[in-house]
Image (spheres, rainbow, N blue to C red):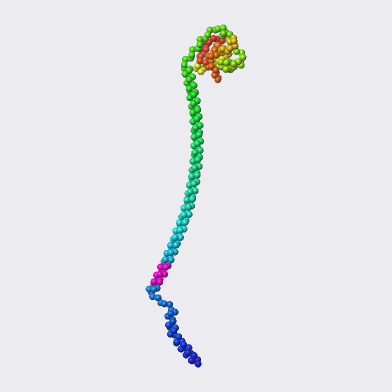
Amino acid sequence: MKTISILVVAAMALLALPSLAQEEPDEKPAVESPDTTNKHADEHSADEAIDKAKDATNKAIETAKNAIIKAIEKAKKHSSSAIETGKEATEDALGKASKTTEILDKVAEATREILDKVKQATSEILEKAKEVTEQKSEADEPPDAPPAPPAQSATESDLRKVKDDDRMVDAWKLKVDQVEDRDVYGPDGKEVGEIEKVLEDGDGQIRAVVVEFGGFLGFGDTEVIVPLDQLQPGKEHFTTKLTQQQLSAFPAWKK
């Protein structure tokens, strides 16, 4: 029985071999030709090259993009800095220009003041020069001949000194004490005498003064009677067109 069983199994195995032989080729991978293999290898290499090229292009684009962004940021930074610097420089320049304008205004004002003062001083100098020239011209001109001294008359003999110092000398609008002891200057600008007394006539009218000149320390003085119209009052002294020599021709005061 064991022998029969073994034989049955062996027979079944032999029957199954042909089918296994036919199915085995389907289970094995198809063997490709060398040309097909090379073609597939080339396609794979091309795909890899394309992928690498894409990667390299993307990296280059990304790098360029980053570089452009950095350049823009840097340019913006420099532009902002330059604008700020330009703004500060402009404000500084405007400030300096404003100060310069103020200085120029002050200089102009000071110049105007100086010119006004120079103009005023020049006018005063010219006016004084004119006065000096006129005085010199008058001094150079021969003095008017004094009136011939009148002979002693009863009227002159009645003349007397005014005793009231507060009395007004109407012809000069000065009080007696403002007239007496005042110096008298001649046409050459030099002193020719001094007023000693104010005289009135018998009717009480002030007619003349006594002018004293010559002598020394009160000795040897000459006193003459001079009519009021021969003297002109001034701020500091009286003036006359008469010289001392001409004054000496007037009537003497002997009282």
Residue reaching furthest left?
35
Q: Where is residue 205 in the image (x, y as percent from the top left)?
A: 58, 12
Which residue does the image show at 53% across and 8% down from the upper left? 150
Magenta span covers which residues?
Answer: 38-48
Residue 255 visible (yes or no): no
Quarter holding the C terminus is top right
Is residue 237 positioned above or below 29 on the image? Answer: above
Instruction: State yes or no: residue 34 in magenta.
Output: no
Query: Does the segment drawn in magenta span residue 40?
Result: yes
Above or below for 67 versus 188? below
* Percent position of residue 177, x then y: 59, 16
Q: Which residue is drawn at 47% across and 51% down?
A: 79
Does residue 148 appear in this view?
A: yes
Between 60 and 20, the residue placed more toward the observer is 20
Residue at screen point 49% across, 42% down: 94
Residue 23 position within the rendered picture, expressed as x and y whole percent measured from the top left:
44, 81
Q: From this viewpoint, which residue is outermost toward the bottom?
A: 1
